[in-house]
Amino acid sequence: MRITLAVVIAGALCGASAWAAAPVGAGKVYAGKEGESVAIIPLTGPESKDGKQVLLYVQGTSSEFDGKALLHTMSETNKGADYFTPYRGENFYTLVVRDSWGTKRYELWVPGRKDGLSVTFDEKRTQALKAEDIYSQHQKQKSDGTLGKLAAFNRKEREDGNQQSFADELKAMNEACGTKVTASIDWKSVSDDVIKKYSIASYCANPLSSLRGLCDSAAGKKAITAKVKKLTCQFGTELKLAIQEGTVSWTTAPDAANQEEFATKYFEKNL
């Protein structure tokens, strides 16, 4: 009985010690007008990396980040601070803090939303926050692969998203010109580094935007209808544009400027 009781007491003390040793400080919660909120929980001890590592816990945004205890790095700027985390193979800036006329403005960003959400300090939610629980959730999501899946680069997902945006641009051009032009992207010419850094759809759509603008005139619409049937796009080191037998061959380059203007000048001379 003594041995059993000693083991139980030791186990209880060990559990209490582990719980108390959760490397987190007191957190704060910031909330918005639409029910969204973000808890900022600083890590302590070796995990803190000089106070630059925190957990952000987002709720109420209907995004992938909801309910995830995500490790973030805090980067100070001359106007405030940025909090970023790895997402889909690159850094995602979830929380942006800026000093504005003596006060701090907090803006929450999540995947799937074009605009940031303004959030302010919520004292009631801060008092109810249990930082140790969020840390435990972080550990669980880390071990079961949830966080790793969010952080990993997904080439197919990135291609699919750009392909849809490119299709939308093509549709807008065809509607403006009254045409049935088809278009494609040579994905083999797009490296992982390029697709992570740039909007492939935007670069490939520059000739489509140019053609749509030229369709504002009757003469431009007539020429495009007669001579443009297909567009292909690939990535290279310099801008190139050619049209032959109804096919527009477009080579775009990440560092090249004024690409739509380049395409417009070519079309005006060659259509």
Image: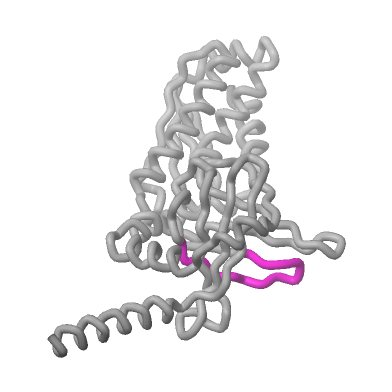
> Which residue is depicted at the point 13% across and 85% down?
1
Residue 36 or residue 266, whichever sits in front: 36
Asked if residue 201 is positioned above or below residue 30 in the image, the reply reads: above
> Which residue is depicted at the point 15% across and 84% down?
4
Q: Which residues are magenta?
A: 70-82
> Is 127 situated left or right of 234 in this image?
right
Residue sitting farthest toward the right: 101
**Residue 179 in magenta stretch:** no
Residue 110 or residue 25, whichever sits in front: 25
Prevailing SS of the magenta stretch: strand
Residue 240 makes an appearance in the image: no
Q: Quadrant of residue 187?
A: top left
Asked if residue 220 is positioned above or below residue 60 in the image, the reply reads: above
> Which residue is depicted at the point 66% across and 24% down?
213
Asked if residue 28 is positioned above or below residue 5 in the image, the reply reads: above
**Residue 76 in magenta stretch:** yes
Residue 60 on image: x %, y % = 53, 44
Residue 172 on image: x %, y % = 56, 21
